[in-house]
Image (tube, grey):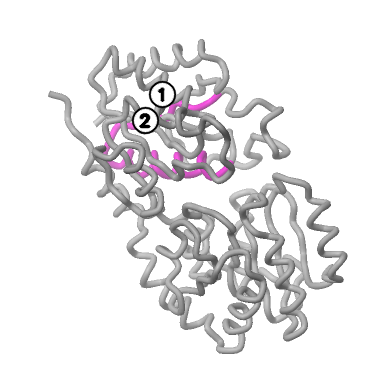
């Protein structure tokens, strides 16, 4: 089949661009695939990070054209005309926030007026983490021309059927992020990062309030009273970094928290995960998290919260711990249980078995069940 993926791609950076590249690569093993990406993904005034451009190399050489300006409707018409001329059998939109709903919904409508292409939305989120007025109406507009959906957790499934009760869809868990190299020895990774402590935890990813970093910093004060543990905070801050640094200073935790407040290139990700004993994701709200799938790629246990679909992936007492959100005491208890009961080896072994269900082969097989050949 001929497939067009619509969404961010290299040289744009971030999880969605990475996932589109991986998706395109795997689909291209059996199909003719290209990506239609953005000339401008976010206006600079709306982008909280330092840069929208990936400083590294592309993950895969999936044919890509950059045509879409997220806030310029003229570009939507151009993109729709280009896609129409390709005569695809399937168009896949990657949906994660209503900001892109007018753009994606308009392109889908314009294409379907001209050709009999099947439109599939892969939904990381339907209800966004940070809600705004009009989100529901925008999402309905985007979904109006869709023929089928893939939702990445049961929590997102609930949101979908609430909006479109009779829609055709499948639930398929977020596949592994398996493009960041291989596991290094802890000794090697920690030497690169200048770490000396025997116990190291990792908080990884863009820092936003819903990810609960403040809860983890509060917990670190209590954790340090029980045992020496180093926390790595790794990722670009999408809100005021000074607020978190002031909190760390107020608690007197400067010597046990190491901050790497920048976007991490793909070839450096493995070092941070390899250095850690456990990945801690104390989210206050969520649907699912690709960070768990990075951790699982490296067989790293995860301590996370019972929000969204996170507990669908992290199995309490088997591949990590799942605790109540916004609860420093519960987080402290889970961290100390992890170390005092020496859970790392057993959990890592369990992850190596559990992660098989999150392979890209399985994801593509499930996705292909939605494909319908043109009449």
**C-alpha span from label 2 to label 1:** 7 Å
Image: 287 above or below 280: above
What residue is rendered at 48% in x and 39% in y?
96
Q: Which residues are magenta?
A: 14-38
Residue 25 horizontal/vertical position (percent): 39, 42
Q: Residues within 10 Å of mark 2 (few under 14, many from 20)?
A: many
> Which element type, helix, strand or loop, lies under badge 2?
helix
What residue is rendered at 67% in x and 30% in y?
46
What residue is rendered at 47% in x and 76% in y?
348
In depth, the one of 134 and 128 nearer the eye is: 134
Residue 31 horizontal/vertical position (percent): 28, 35
Q: Residue furthest bottom?
A: 341
Q: Residues within 10 Å of mark 1 (few under 14, many from 20)?
A: many
Q: Which mark is residue 298?
A: none
Image: 345 above or below 28: below
In depth, the one of 323 and 172 nearer the eye is: 323
> How many marks can you see?
2
- Asked if the residue under mark 1 is in contact with the one under mark 2, i.e. CB atoms within 8 Å, the reply is yes
Left or right of 30? Residue 37 is: right
Q: Which quadrant holds residue 192?
A: bottom right
In reply to whether residue 21 is colored magenta, the answer given is yes
In reply to whether residue 300 is colored magenta, the answer given is no
What residue is rendered at 65% in x and 77% in y?
332
Q: Quadrant of the C terminus?
A: top left
Q: Which mark is residue 143?
A: 2
Left or right of 160? Residue 132 is: right
Residue on which the image places disc 1: 105
Residue 123 horizontal/vertical position (percent): 41, 42
Residue 64 horizontal/vertical position (percent): 46, 28
Please report whichever mark, 2 or 1, sits nearer to the chain's N-terminal start.
Answer: 1
């Amino acid at each position: 089949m001929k497939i067009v993926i619509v969404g961010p791609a290299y040289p744009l950076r971030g999880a969605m661009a990475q996932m589109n590249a991986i998706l395109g690569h795997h689909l291209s093993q059996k199909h003719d695939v290209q990506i239609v990406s953005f000339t401008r993904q976010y206006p600079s005034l709306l982008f909280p990070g330092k840069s929208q451009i990936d400083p590294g190399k592309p993950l895969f050489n999936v044919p890509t054209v950059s045509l879409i300006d997220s806030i310029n409707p003229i570009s939507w018409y151009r993109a729709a005309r280009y896609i129409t001329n390709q005569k695809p059998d399937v168009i896949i939109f990657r949906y994660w926030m209503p900001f892109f709903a007018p753009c994606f919904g308009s392109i889908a409508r314009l294409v379907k007026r001209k050709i009999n292409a099947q439109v599939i939305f892969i939904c990381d989120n339907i209800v966004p983490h940070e809600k705004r007025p009009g989100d529901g109406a925008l999402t309905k507009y985007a979904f109006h021309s869709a023929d089928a959906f893939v939702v990445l957790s049961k929590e997102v499934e609930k949101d979908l059927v609430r909006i479109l009760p009779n829609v055709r869809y499948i639930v398929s868990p977020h596949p592994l992020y398996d493009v960041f190299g291989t596991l290094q020895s802890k000794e090697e990774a920690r030497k690169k990062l200048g770490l000396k402590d025997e116990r190291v935890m990792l908080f990884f990813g863009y820092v936003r309030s819903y990810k609960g970093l403040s809860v983890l910093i509060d917990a670190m004060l209590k954790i340090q009273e029980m045992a020496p543990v180093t926390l790595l905070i790794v990722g670009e801050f999408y809100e005021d970094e000074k607020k978190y640094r002031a909190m760390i200073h107020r608690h007197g935790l400067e010597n046990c928290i190491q901050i790497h407040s920048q976007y991490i290139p793909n070839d450096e990700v493995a070092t941070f995960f390899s250095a850690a004993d456990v990945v801690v994701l104390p989210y206050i709200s969520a649907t699912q998290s690709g960070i768990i799938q990075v951790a699982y790629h490296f067989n790293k246990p995860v301590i996370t919260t019972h929000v969204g679909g996170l507990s669908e992936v992290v199995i309490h007492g088997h591949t990590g711990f799942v605790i109540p959100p916004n609860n420093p005491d519960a987080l402290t208890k889970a961290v100390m249980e992890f170390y005092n009961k020496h859970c790392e080896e057993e959990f890592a072994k369990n992850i190596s078995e559990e992660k098989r269900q999150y392979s890209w082969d399985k994801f593509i097989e499930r996705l292909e069940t939605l494909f319908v050949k043109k009449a």
